[in-house]
């Protein structure tokens, strides 16, 4: 069985299309939140996700903010501007689709969240302390998360969390208990500008990170044409 695990599309359609094409045929799609925000194509990305079956998904902080479920003042000024711009572009049906995402999903022995088990929408698992706390809260052997836009595995060993990252394409056999981030499709922040995702095989417990190039310049042009914040346009080039 092949599951596409992906997160933080952020309205970047060319990156999403590149990931779907590169992943090829899969048995299920597990999306870890933040479908909108930052990028120029929120509507097209919502439509594309809606067509994927079977799809499990959770809500991200940008999705929640666009729905009015999270105060805009929790975001920096650039992100706020963009969230308002996104709200203007979505119709009732788009918003209804975003609203049906749950905060957390458990599929067999895997928990899906955007941020962390204790604060599913908001907490960033950036360091070992946060990861250790998150592993204590995790009720399943494995947890898949997004939000930081950085591919990583946090492995629990004697109550401590150690970070690990394998090169794209290298298959990892998962050991309990661990938290894994596939990286971001639409706005990577680990210094590699290519779109990131993972393929998970639940039967063999194999996890493989992948990267795929997409037409970054085309997305930047489109963002420019809408007058979207310069900072978010430039960061796509460097993946930071
Ligand atoms: Zn995000």
Image (cartoon, helix red, strand yellow):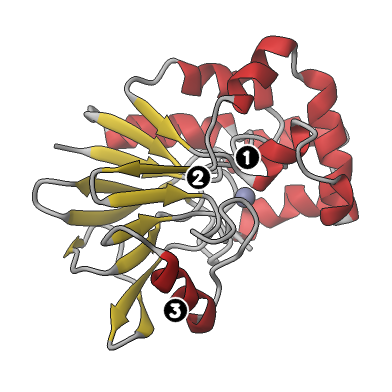
- Does residue 93 appear to the left or right of 45 in the view shown? right
Which residue occupies 55% across, 66% down? Answer: 191
At mark 2, the secondary structure is loop
- Image quarter where the C terminus lies is bottom right
Q: Which residue is mark 1?
A: 10
At mark 1, the secondary structure is loop
Q: Which residue is mark 3?
A: 132
The quadrant holding residue 94 is top right
Residue 146: x and y in percent read 50, 54
Which residue occupies 26% across, 38% down? Answer: 3
Q: Nearer the viewer, residue 16 or 100?
A: 100
Residue 99: x and y in percent read 63, 26
Residue 162: x and y in percent read 36, 83
Mark 2 or mark 3, earlier in chain: 3
Q: Are marks 1 and 2 in contact (CB under 8 Å)?
A: yes
Q: Is residue 211 visible?
A: no
Q: Which residue is mark 2?
A: 185
At mark 3, the secondary structure is helix
Task: Tell whether circle 1 marks a residue whose Cβ is less than 8 angstroms from ligand 1.
Answer: yes
In front: label 2 or label 3: 3
């Amino acid at each position: 069985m092949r599951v596409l695990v992906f997160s933080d599309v952020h309205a970047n359609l060319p990156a999403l299309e590149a990931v779907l094409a590169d992943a090829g045929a899969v048995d299920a799609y597990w999306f870890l939140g933040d479908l909108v925000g930052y990028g120029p194509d929120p509507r097209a990305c919502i439509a594309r996700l809606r067509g994927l079956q079977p799809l499990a998904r959770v809500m991200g902080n940008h999705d929640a903010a666009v729905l009015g479920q999270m105060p805009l003042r929790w975001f920096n000024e650039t992100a706020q501007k963009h969230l308002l711009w996104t709200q203007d572009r979505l119709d009732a049906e788009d918003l209804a689709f975003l609203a049906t995402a749950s905060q957390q999903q458990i599929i067999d022995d895997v928990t899906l969240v955007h941020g962390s088990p204790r604060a599913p929408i908001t907490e960033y698992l950036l360091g070992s302390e946060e990861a250790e706390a998150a592993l204590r809260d995790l009720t399943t052997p494995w947890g898949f998360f997004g939000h930081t836009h950085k591919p990583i595995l946090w492995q629990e060993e004697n109550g401590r969390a150690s970070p690990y990252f394998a090169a794209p394409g290298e298959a990892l056999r998962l050991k309990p208990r661990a938290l894994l981030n596939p990286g971001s499709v639409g706005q990577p922040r680990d210094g590699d500008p290519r779109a990131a995702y993972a393929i998970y095989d639940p039967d063999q417990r194999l996890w493989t990170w992948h990267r795929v190039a997409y037409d970054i310049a085309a997305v930047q042009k489109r963002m420019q044409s809408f007058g979207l914040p310069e900072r978010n346009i430039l960061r796509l080039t460097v993946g930071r």
